[in-house]
Amino acid sequence: MTETPLHRAILDTNVLHPAGMRDILLQLGADGLIEPKWSAEIGRELLTSLRRRRPDIEPERLDRTWAEMNHYFPNAQITGYEEHINQLQLPDPDDLHVLAAAIVGDCDVIVTRNLRDFPVNVVAAYGVSVLHPDNFMRNLLSVRTYEFCDAVRKLRLRLRRPPYSVEQYLEHLERDELGATVALLHQHAHRL
């Protein structure tokens, strides 16, 4: 039985793609290591970005992915944050909705690749930290090694088109800007 999740983590749009990064974060959520959170606005941004970057993927398939995320994580979507947006300040006003949702959702961390858009001193005032997904996952791996490796193994074995060896899967994660996590996973490759 998995212990209480270490983090209630709001997943910014930019960590929900590429697919490899999204899949590992969601598997960690499915296994109870984290409690993933997002908002409808994050979903809209995700679908808009994916449609622009991946015109080869049918829009219906992208919509289905978002619907499945919300189905498998029915408590992930944060609502009622919109009224707080105007009370906040960040370098990029387009990110205010993420901080507002993190505050309303009682999240302890924003997982994002845009660290400069969430100054530590600003988000810390609301009891929220901000971490790059690589640091977030590496930290989680270092304290919940067996469970994290089990999540990665399940995810890797589920991939069939194409199937991945351990080394191929770790290379795939490294391309997704998860180098520090991959370096630590190499030490536990026999578990993957």
Image (cartoon, rainbow, N blue to C red):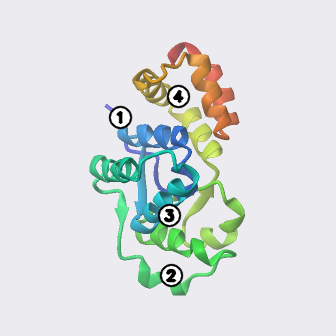
Q: Earlier in the sequence, mark 4 or mark 2?
A: 2
Query: In this rendering, which labeled residue sits more in front, label 4 or label 3?
Result: 3
Quadrant of residue 125 within the rendered picture: bottom right
Q: Which residue is mark 3?
A: 45
Q: Earlier in the sequence, mark 1 or mark 2?
A: 1
Q: CA distance from mark 1 to mark 2?
A: 35 Å
Give the amino acid at mark 4: Thr
Q: Which residue is mark 1?
A: 2
Question: Are the residues tagged 1 and 2 within 8 Å (C-beta)?
Answer: no
Q: Earlier in the sequence, mark 3 or mark 2?
A: 3
Front-most of 65 and 61?
A: 61
Query: In this rendering, which labeled residue sits more in front, label 3 or label 1?
Result: 3
Query: In this rendering, which labeled residue sits more in front, label 3 or label 2?
Result: 3
Give the amino acid at mark 1: Thr
Indicate left or right for 97 with 136 as reference.
left
Query: In this rendering, which labeled residue sits more in front, label 1 or label 2?
Result: 2
Quadrant of residue 187 within the rendered picture: top right
On residue 85, the disc is 2
Q: Position of residue 69 (x, y in %)?
A: 35, 49
Front-most of 4 and 43?
A: 43
On residue 145, the disc is 4
For the question of whether residue 97 can be seen, the reply is yes
Q: Position of residue 165 (x, y in %)?
A: 55, 15
Q: Position of residue 36 (x, y in %)?
A: 42, 51
Q: CA distance from mark 4 to mark 2?
A: 37 Å
For the question of whether residue 33 can be seen, the reply is no
Q: For numbered disc 3, what is the local secondary structure?
A: helix
